[in-house]
Amino acid sequence: MRLGIYAVILAFVVIVTGGVASAQQYPIMDEIAQKVIQKYRNASCEQLWQQRGQPKSPREQEAIQALRNDPQMRAVFIDRVAAPIANKMFECGLLP
């Protein structure tokens, strides 16, 4: 799953939900969230700048559609990824 503009948008949204208990309801989403977090942690700032706005793979598009269709799962996903992504973006100058 490549870093995309959708991940950037997720970094700006803060939704409080049931935390770890809710994440366990969505094991696949939890795996995806972990991969997104790891990609941001391991990516250089230059890589993040280059990957902004690139087209999404069909698999990414499916994941995004699933999050759009399930507000509860989306809330859990955003709760998991928002802080690590926002911190990295701040370090890279992608956030004010």
Image: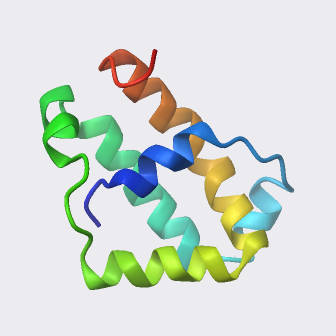
Q: Is residue 70 above or below residue 10?
A: below
User: In screen coordinates, is 75 left or right of 31?
Assistant: right
Q: Is residue 15 above or below residue 34?
A: above
Residue plotted at (36% across, 16% down): 91
Residue plotted at (57% across, 82% down): 66
Could you tell me if residue 27 is visible in this image?
no
Could you tell me if residue 86 is visible in this image?
yes
Most foreground residue, 80 or 6: 6
- How many marks the image carries: the answer is 0
Q: Is residue 69 above or below residue 19?
A: below
Residue 39 at x, y percent in the picture: 30, 48
For the rendered model, the colour scheme is rainbow
Residue plotted at (42% across, 19% down): 90
Residue 20 at x, y percent in the picture: 75, 56
Residue 42 at x, y percent in the picture: 25, 38
Q: Residue furthest right?
A: 18
Most foreground residue, 11 or 23: 11
User: In screen coordinates, is 49 left or right of 64?
Assistant: left
Residue 38 at x, y percent in the picture: 35, 47
Residue plotted at (47% across, 78% down): 63
Q: Quadrant of the N terminus?
A: bottom left
Q: Quadrant of residue 23?
A: bottom right
Q: Is residue 6 above or below residue 49?
A: below
